[in-house]
Each structure stands twice: as structure tokens, then as C-alpha cells.
Amino acid sequence: MSTKTSYAPGNFCWFELATSDQKAAKSFYSSVFGWETDDQPMGPDQFYTMLTLDGKNLGALFGMSKEEMGSGIPPHWGLYISVTSADETAKKAESVGGKIIMAPFDVMDVGRMAVIQDPTGAIFSIWQASKHLGASLIGETNSFCWWELNTKDTAKAKEFNTLLFDWSTGGDPNYTEWKNGSDTIGGMMEIKPEWGPVPPNWLSYVQVKNCDETAAKIKELGGSVMMGPQDIPNMGRFAVASDPQRAVFAIYQPNTK
């Protein structure tokens, strides 16, 4: 993968952290992954922080409003899926059982988006690019590389997403793989009772050189490691973690060839 200059409809294209402490989040992720930050004004005393690596866009973070935090919405990583038309995709999402959380709207002159909840409760955004493509670096060390839906109803989620994005599926009974055309782009797992009160969610993975060392760094800087590090047979090594504000993400170290 690496540098991106375009996204096919149905591919994951942008990754965004909503946090309760913007300054602390910038410091944490910069220290863990070496990300650079660039604050873009978005209102009185408000900034949209672009996250970059070697000058290439990876994603962004922003501070949650008092209303959002007061309503019980936790800090979280969100993701965007590329579409040809935000309006048509949102309309189709409703027709196949989804719920529109935010109707399609223009983001200045950079693109058009909507926020959707699937029938199992997982939330994601769609992105119709104009001036802003999305992430320009994917699948390299310290950039996002994999996206996984955790849900309590895999059959319903499979039906919804394959109808909405024309994805197909592969994998095995324990792990579904999402395919967009010939490319495998992500996966899906069933939420297990032993996980506790985990809501349906999309989990984003960051590729790292050494999973164990990165997990130790996360804990050293005030984050938590909730699962792993552990091996994925014949694939690599991963861990599920959270930052100090409790936004959850994962790290992945691929096997070297």
C-alpha cells in the first residue's frame, strides 16, 4: 500500500479521534507513533488537529464539546469510508436498515459526509471527497493498516455492509474478512460475553515495527493494554489498547518475510 492518491468507493479513507483532552492526546500519539500535529482553526478556541507522518496525512483529532461529554459519549476513534455520493449512500443505508445519525452535509469545500449507524449499533462515517482525499499514507509503519467491526450480530452486519458497499466476504467461521473488489480491507468479529459491556464498534489498527515494545510504551505513557500482545498465526502480532482518555485502538506487527 503506502502513499495514496485516490480511494475506490468502499475503501476506508480517513480516521478521526474525538477526545476529551486534545493537548494530552496530541502528546500521547506523537510519543507512541512519532506523529506530527498541525492545528487548524475551526471556531472560537477550537482546532482540528491534522496528524501526519513525514508530511503525509494519516488522520486527525479534535476536542469533544461539553455537550458530547455530558451526554455520555466516550472518547473514541471513528473512521470514514469512501463513497461516490454521500447523499445516495445515506439514502441506501436507510433502505437496508441503517440509521442516519447526521444527514449529508458539506465540510467547507473539502468534501461531503454523513454519519451512519448500522442495524447492529456500530457507527461510521462516509466521505465524498472534493479537495480532501483522506489519508495519504496507509499500511506503512506507524500508519493505519486494518479496520475491524466488532458486533453482537455478525449475520445482520454482513447483510448490511455487503448491500451498502458491495463488499464481499471471506475468512472462516471465527473471523469474517471484508473484501472490496479483489482487495481484503478489514474484518469482523463477534463480541464475546467475556469481553464485558463492549458496544458494537469499528476498531482501527496502527502498524508498528515491534508490538511488544509499542505496548510497553503505551502503558508507560498512561494508556492501557486490554488484550495481548499476542500472535495471529501465520500473520503477525497484535494488541488492543486505549489512550489515557480511554479511546480504544489496536496495534499490529506483521510477520517479516
Image (cartoon, helix red, strand yellow):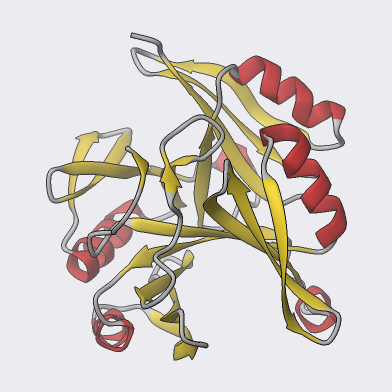
Q: Residue at x 35, y 50 (%)?
A: 4
Q: Quadrant of the C terminus?
A: top left
Q: Position of residue 231 (x, y in %)?
A: 49, 15
Q: Is residue 245 visible?
A: no
Q: Position of residue 54 (x, y in %)?
A: 57, 41
Q: Residue 189 occupies which quadrant of the picture?
A: top left
Q: Position of residue 232 (x, y in %)?
A: 42, 19
Q: Is residue 177 left or right of residue 251?
A: left
Residue ranking furthest to the front: 55
Q: Residue 40 occupies which quadrant of the picture?
A: bottom right
Q: Quadrant of the N terminus?
A: top left
Q: Residue at x 23, y 65 (%)?
A: 9
218 up-or-down from 45: above or below: above
Q: Is residue 199 left or right of residue 113?
A: right
Q: Residue at x 32, y 35 (%)?
A: 175
Q: Is residue 186 left or right of residue 43?
A: left
Residue ranking furthest to the left: 182
159 up-or-down from 25: above or below: below
Residue ranking furthest to the top: 257
208 up-or-down from 50: above or below: above
Q: Residue at x 32, y 60 (%)?
A: 157
Q: Nearer the viewer, residue 192 or 227?
A: 227
| Labels in figure, total | 0
201 up-or-down from 132: above or below: above
Q: Is residue 167 visible?
A: yes
Q: Position of residue 207 (x, y in %)?
A: 51, 31
Q: Nearer the viewer, residue 148 or 143?
A: 143
